[in-house]
């Protein structure tokens, strides 16, 4: 993973199986909205067409590793929610590439994936976050060992099916405007 950004999620529950999150680059008053994430329970993910599944990532590793945490929430409340998140899949798009220093959200939105194993998170980013928030990913990992991921295990097509995914913009020919029906309201 060559590009990594700190991401603060603010989520609402559509129902018990679907969450939608706005993603900011920080939690302060100057925070920039950089993306969105949709989170779904395992049964909804399994019902997706196979060609859609690689665009979604699992949350089991992020939760159990301790790197996904909820600042300010009491531990018991946080763990109760993370037990559910651990079983979900997410689809994330970032519109603003703040890690490149962009002053505005330029270019095509980027499909983002999650960390899925040790050694992916840059050490300096981990230490910075742990220091600012007073957390220990290792201690949290120990406390979360009991948590379970998806009932059927992580689907082999999730997480990019083990491959990178890239959105491409391409030029296509469109019919002349005069050939399309028009409706003005």
Image (tube, helix red, strand yellow):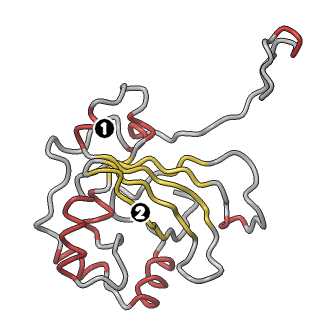
Along the line of sight, which residue is nearer the eye, 127 or 181?
181
Q: Residue 168 at what x, y percent from top left?
A: 67, 35
Q: Residue 61 at what x, y percent from top left?
A: 29, 60
Cα–Cα span, label 2 and label 1: 18 Å
The local secondary structure at tag 2 comes to strand
Q: Is residue 62 left or right of residue 21?
A: left
* Vertical relation: 38 (above or below) 131: above
The local secondary structure at tag 1 comes to helix
Q: Residue 153 at what x, y percent from top left?
A: 18, 44
Which quarter of the figure has residue 85?
bottom left
Counting residues from the N terminus, which is met first, the one under dot 2 or under dot 1?
Answer: 2
- The label on residue 135 is none
Residue holding disc 2: 11
Q: Residue 25 at what x, y percent from top left?
A: 58, 71
- The label on residue 45 is 1
Which quarter of the figure has residue 114?
bottom left
Q: Is residue 111 left or right of residue 79?
A: right
> Most extreme residue toward the top, as rendered?
179
* Vertical relation: 168 (above or below) 114: above
Q: Nearer the viewer, mark 2 or mark 1?
A: 2
Q: Is residue 174 left or right of residue 37?
A: right
> Most extreme residue toward the left, as rendered?
146
Q: Residues within 10 Å of mark 1 (few under 14, many from 20)?
A: many
Q: Residue at x 24, y 85 (%)?
A: 74
* Vertical relation: 58 (above or below) 164: below
Q: Residue at x 35, y 70 (%)?
A: 68
* Vertical relation: 68 (above or below) 179: below
């Amino acid at each position: 993973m060559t590009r990594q950004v700190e991401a603060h999620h603010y989520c609402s529950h559509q129902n018990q199986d679907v969450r939608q999150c706005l993603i900011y680059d920080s939690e302060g008053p100057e925070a920039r909205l950089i993306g969105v994430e949709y989170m779904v329970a395992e049964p909804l993910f399994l019902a997706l067409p196979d060609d859609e599944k690689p665009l979604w990532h699992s949350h089991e590793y992020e939760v159990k590793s301790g790197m996904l945490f909820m600042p300010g929430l009491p531990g018991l409340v946080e763990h109760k929610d993370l037990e559910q998140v651990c079983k979900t899949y997410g689809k994330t798009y970032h519109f603003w590439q703040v890690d490149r220093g962009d002053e505005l959200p330029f270019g095509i939105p980027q499909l983002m994936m999650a960390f899925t194993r040790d050694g992916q998170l840059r050490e300096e980013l981990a230490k910075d976050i742990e220091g600012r928030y007073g957390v220990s990913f290792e201690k949290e990992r120990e406390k979360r060992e009991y948590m379970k991921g998806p009932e059927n295990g992580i689907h082999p097509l999730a997480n990019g099916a083990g491959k990178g995914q890239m959105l491409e913009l391409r030029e296509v020919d469109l019919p002349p405007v005069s050939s399309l029906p028009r409706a003005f309201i």
